[in-house]
Amino acid sequence: MENEFSEKKTNGTYIKEYREKNKGKLREQRKKYYDKNKEAISKYIKKWRGENPDKVKKYYERQKERYKNDPEFRKRQQEAYKRWLEKNPRPKKVKESEAKSEDSNVATVASPSSQG
């Protein structure tokens, strides 16, 4: 007399299947939660990093080794960085000589002694 309940799933198996089946829904829920609690999460992370510098250092060392030795990981990281740059473009840098000349032009125009 076998039925669907004869092989009881372990809790871990059930959770794994649920997460796989509801990937999109869970991603949306996590994003909404993060957007709603961004400041609190950032404070917690900053506090945790301050309290656990040894774990943070170990994590970064492991990531650095992985980046150096695993070409697939390196490629994924580079692609993620490119996507991030598309969403967060860097401000254009102004050359030092151009910045000085702009500053001096502004100073002479705004200066009351040069209008006299």
Image (cartoon, rainbow, N blue to C red):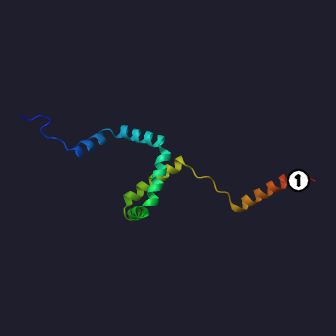
Q: Position of residue 116 (x, y in %)?
A: 93, 53
Give the residue drawn at x 41%, y 54%.
Answer: 76
Q: Amino acid at mark 1?
A: Pro
55 lies left or right of 97: left
Q: What residue occupies the far right of the structure in this picture?
A: 116
Give the residue drawn at x 64%, y 56%.
Answer: 93
Residue 49 placement: quadrant: bottom left
Where is 89 relative to 29, above or below? below
- Within 10 Å of the Cα at label 1, are there few (<14), some (14-19), or many (20+) other Cα atoms? few
Where is 27 relative to 102, above or below? above
Q: Secondary structure at mark 1?
A: helix
Q: What residue occupies the far left of the structure in this picture?
A: 1
Name the residue carrying label 1.
112
Q: Position of residue 42 (x, y in %)?
A: 48, 50
Q: Position of residue 101 (x, y in %)?
A: 77, 59
Looking at the image, how many numbered discs can be counted on the residues? 1
Residue 99 placement: quadrant: bottom right
Q: Which of the pair 71/116 is nearer the observer? A: 116
- State the quadrant of the N terminus: top left
Give the residue drawn at x 48%, y 47%.
Answer: 40
Q: Position of residue 65 (x, y in %)?
A: 39, 65
104 lies left or right of 65: right
Give the residue drawn at x 48%, y 41%.
Answer: 35
